[in-house]
Image (spheres, rainbow, N blue to C red):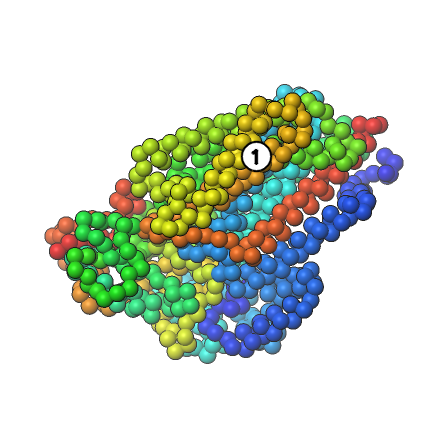
């Protein structure tokens, strides 16, 4: 790269873009595929923009579907970065210090996806400016959705700016001033819990929906996210470890496994507690859970979905806990992947859709996303993956160069 | 702006153009199609279908304020713009009002479950009066056929389609209950829905961003969303409209029963009450001690739905 004298903020940005554009055939194909999927997502969204949300599978009864499900789950993934930030910055764990920047990159990617899911779910995206305080009206503090807008954007800023500040200093060849960024790190730790709790409160605060109106919602959100998020980060670290020169210490994986196992077990205990409450003495407040786990009035599209999720969740938690391969990555990595998928199934569709079924007037319908929803969702996932790869690649090159000097 | 573009009525020209463009797009490569489709549908109005007056009006409409923050002059201006737009686009002579709540009035509604026989005249009248979407068959009022001994519409049959009344069944209607402590208005992130001083919970269709949080928050299934552009046969459009009431909604916005605000604020009864052949529906001013609704509250056995939620609805069921 350039010599230190010529570096400034402008060259920082240019260099980050440049080093992201280079790369072998594999990475170029990967990038093209992502671009293609994003283009397809935009194409699918154009139908929604023209005809309205009637091109989705949602209706007046199931008024939130695949978009909000994915949004909810990804908030958890975003908040899970705190599981790296906490040991790295607060307990000064040297192993985690090397990987914390990756966790923050994942958080930024997840948050961008969250915000995109909200925007594509809006019936009037052109009116989204009505939310901006000053030019619009912000129903704060009454509306939990308003709180969510604040915490999500705040967390995005924190997780974008702190790493950017550190990286910029490292790029300039000097250590970052910890006194300057440390308060923001602490803030981001509290903030991570807040994005979770606020998103849970979004549902928890609705007495109209007994399935959501449940004080365990927030804590269970945290537990499932602290399992799914680190599981995803483990997978990303494994990819980085095997495909780049940036090597990650085995101890990082071991510590992550511990975090995942503990969170996954707490999550399962809470799931058991919820299931017990719903089925030991079922009331008319249990009808959503009955619909979810056993189906109702001949409608049972979610039954295989939730049982698959619970089984996969249980199995992968057991594998991660008992570690049958003696730290063999060929056993642990698939277990992480399966745990991630199981929690996605459960904390996404398995949480949002049954909350709306049966309707407050007892009507039961099934919900299936349409191709438009699936394509837009895939497009947003590709956008997230693109952002994460861009941020992580830039961060790793700068860090390696800095540590090499 | 795409929502604005197709706001009122039907425009055959516009529809034709859309399908042309769509066939054209199919021929393009995916990426190119995606980009141009997003641009044409999202931002750039098709030039031929517009004229500069319409553009200007739509532009002003896009940047207008929340209804509650408007002065009376601003309300008059937006109403004039909407009337003009309806004329320009669909040739409709809409008479839109923005009249304020009457002083000393708080509306209340009574539903006589002994009398209702499930004819659904109220539903038909509501659909017609309020310009509800005929394509998806939007209905504010639901009538449930109930088994004796049950009082929760959730246990009833809301899809019945046979000769009524059926022996040994009774009928219960639901709609927006205009709660005093409304969960929906609390949930709205932009204050696009609120309770007016006369007790009517309204939506500013142009301020709503379509997030549907209010719909999730409503324990009575009282809200409806415009999943697509509402379609009403031109000759059936009710031209006597209110800004907060039955004006034709844009797509992607929430709507709901407004106690026929366009009628009741002029001292008339809601369409459902007027249409009911059995006299099961009672509507009036709760602050007027001589009103029929006050008589019902005083002399009949009344109850409200999901009282335990503390929403304090202004809608009572009663038994003769």
| Quadrant in which the N terminus of chain A is drawn | top right
Location of residue A392 by image quarter: top right
Residue A222 at x, y = what percent? 51, 32
Q: Say whether residue A161 is left or right of residue A152.
A: right
User: Disc 1 sits on a residue from what chain?
Assistant: A
Q: Is residue A304 visible?
A: yes
Is A207 above or below relative to A49?
above
Q: How many marks?
A: 1
Foreground pick, A134 / A101: A101
Is A215 above or below relative to B144?
above
Foreground pick, A204 / A339: A339
Residue A121 at x, y = what percent? 52, 53
Q: Residue at x 44, y 35 (%)?
A: A217
**Badge 1: residue crowd in 10 Å (few <14, some 14–19, many ≥20):** many
Q: Is residue B263 visible?
A: no
Foreground pick, A332 / A383: A332
Foreground pick, B62 / B300: B300
Residue B267 at x, y = what percent? 25, 66
Q: Residue at x 67, y 44 (%)?
A: A385
Location of residue A175 by image quarter: top right
Residue B50 at x, y = what percent? 57, 75
Q: Say whether residue B127 is left or right of residue A100.
A: left
* Residue of label 1: A339
Q: Say whether residue B299 is left or right of residue A73.
A: left
Is A99 above or below relative to A112?
above
């Amino acid at each position: 790269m350039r010599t230190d004298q010529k570096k400034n903020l402008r060259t920082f940005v240019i260099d980050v873009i440049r080093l992201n554009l280079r790369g072998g055939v594999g990475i170029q194909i990967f990038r093209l595929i992502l671009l293609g999927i994003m283009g397809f997502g935009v194409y699918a969204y154009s139908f929604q923009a023209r005809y309205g949300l009637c091109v989705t599978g949602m209706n007046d009864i199931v008024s939130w579907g695949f978009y909000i499900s994915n949004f909810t789950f990804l908030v958890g993934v975003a908040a899970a970065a705190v599981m790296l930030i906490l040991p790295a910055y607060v307990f000064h764990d040297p192993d985690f210090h090397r990987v914390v920047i990756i966790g923050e990159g994942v958080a930024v990617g997840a948050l961008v996806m969250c915000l995109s899911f909200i925007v594509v779910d809006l019936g009037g995206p052109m009116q989204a400016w009505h939310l901006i305080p000053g030019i619009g009206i912000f129903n704060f503090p009454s509306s939990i959705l308003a709180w969510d807008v604040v915490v999500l954007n705040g967390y995005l800023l924190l997780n974008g700016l702190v790493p950017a500040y550190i990286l910029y200093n490292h790029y300039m060849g000097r250590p970052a001033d910890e006194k300057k960024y440390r308060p923001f790190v602490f803030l981001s730790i509290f903030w991570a819990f807040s994005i979770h709790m606020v998103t849970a409160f979004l549902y928890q605060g609705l007495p109209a929906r007994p399935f959501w109106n449940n004080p365990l919602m927030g804590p269970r959100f945290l537990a499932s996210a602290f399992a799914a998020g680190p599981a995803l980060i483990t997978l990303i670290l494994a990819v980085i470890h095997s495909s780049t020169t940036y090597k990650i210490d085995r101890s990082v994986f071991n510590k992550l496994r511990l975090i995942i196992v503990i969170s996954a077990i707490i999550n399962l205990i809470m799931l058991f507690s919820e299931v017990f409450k719903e089925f030991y003495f079922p009331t008319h407040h249990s009808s959503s859970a009955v619909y979810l786990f056993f189906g109702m009035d001949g409608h049972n599209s979610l039954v295989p979905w939730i049982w698959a999720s619970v089984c996969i969740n249980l199995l992968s938690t057991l594998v991660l806990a008992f570690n049958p391969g003696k730290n063999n990555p060929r056993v642990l990595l698939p277990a992480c992947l399966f745990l991630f998928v199981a929690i996605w199934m459960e904390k996404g569709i398995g949480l949002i859709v049954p909350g709306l079924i049966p309707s407050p007037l007892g009507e039961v319908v099934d919900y299936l996303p349409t191709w438009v929803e699936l394509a837009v969702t895939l497009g947003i996932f590709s956008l997230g993956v693109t952002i994460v790869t861009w941020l992580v690649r830039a961060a790793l090159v700068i860090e390696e160069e800095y540590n090499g000097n | 702006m795409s929502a604005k573009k197709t706001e009122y009525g039907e425009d055959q020209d516009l529809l034709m153009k859309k399908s042309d463009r769509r066939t054209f797009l199919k021929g393009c490569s995916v990426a190119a199609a995606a980009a141009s489709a997003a641009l044409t549908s999202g931002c750039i109005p098709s030039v031929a279908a517009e004229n500069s007056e319409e553009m200007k009006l739509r532009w002003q409409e896009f940047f207008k304020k929340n209804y509650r923050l408007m002065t009376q002059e601003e309300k008059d201006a937006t109403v004039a713009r909407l009337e003009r737009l309806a004329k320009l686009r669909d040739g409709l002579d809409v008479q839109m009002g923005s009249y304020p709540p009457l002083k000393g009035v708080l509306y209340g509604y009574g539903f006589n479950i002994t009398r209702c026989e499930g004819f659904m005249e109220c539903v038909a009248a509501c659909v017609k009066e309020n310009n509800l979407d005929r394509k998806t068959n939007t209905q504010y009022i639901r009538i449930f056929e109930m088994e004796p001994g049950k009082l929760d519409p959730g246990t009833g049959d809301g899809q019945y389609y046979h000769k009524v009344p059926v022996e040994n069944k009774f009928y219960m209607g639901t709609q927006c209950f205009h709660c005093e402590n409304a969960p929906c208005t609390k949930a709205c992130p932009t204050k696009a829905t609120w309770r007016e001083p006369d007790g009517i919970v309204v939506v500013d269709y142009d301020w709503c961003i379509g997030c549907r949080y209010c719909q999730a928050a409503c324990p009575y299934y009282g809200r409806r969303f415009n999943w697509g552009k509402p379609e009403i046969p031109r000759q059936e459009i009710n031209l006597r409209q209110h800004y907060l009431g039955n004006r034709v909604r844009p797509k992607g916005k929430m709507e709901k029963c407004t106690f026929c605000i366009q009628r009741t604020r002029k001292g008339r009864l809601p369409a459902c009450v007027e249409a009911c052949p059995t006299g099961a529906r009672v509507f009036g001013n709760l602050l007027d001690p001589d009103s029929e609704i006050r008589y019902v509250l005083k002399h009949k056995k009344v109850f409200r739905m999901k009282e335990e939620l503390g929403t304090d609805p202004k809608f009572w069921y009663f038994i003769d």
